Amino acid sequence: MPPVVTSLDYSRDGKLIAHAFFTKDVNGATGYLARPLNLAIGLGLDGAITGVRIVEHHEPILTIGVSDKDLAAFVERYAGLKI
């Protein structure tokens, strides 16, 4: 089992509310040209993605005008979707 961090809500008696993990620990994800791509993902107990952040990437697309901010905005659109 890959490393997962659990999130507890102490305002609700410490109940488990979500999990967080890095994609590199789950599937060794790669981006374009098979370079490392690592996302931090929050996953609610209902299977909904609670948040996504880019931790590491080496995407050459940035050389043609796509910014880190653009990439971050793209992955953040996954928040709220269910797996």
Image: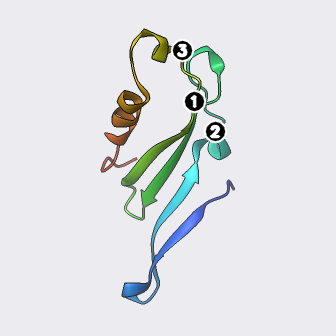
Amino acid type, mark 2 = Asn
Q: Position of residue 60 (x, y in %)?
A: 54, 14
Residue at 67%, 46% (x, y): give it.
25
Q: Residues within 10 Å of mark 1 (few under 14, many from 20)?
A: some
- The front one of 1 and 60 is 60
Mark in front: 2 vs 1: 1
Mark closer to the chain start, 2 or 3? 2
Farthest top residue? 64
Mark closer to the chain start, 2 or 1? 2
State the mark number for residue 60.
3
Q: Would residue 54 appear left or right of 3 to someone viewing this image?
A: left
Q: Which residue is mark 2?
A: 27
Q: Is residue 73 above or below residue 58?
A: below
**Secondary element type, mark 2:** loop
Look at the image and tell me in which quarter the N terminus lies: bottom right
**Secondary element type, mark 3:** helix
Q: Residues within 10 Å of mark 2 (few under 14, many from 20)?
A: few
Residue at 65%, 22% (x, y): give it.
35
Task: Give the Cα separation between the discs numbered 2 and 1.
Answer: 15 Å
Q: Which residue is mark 1?
A: 57
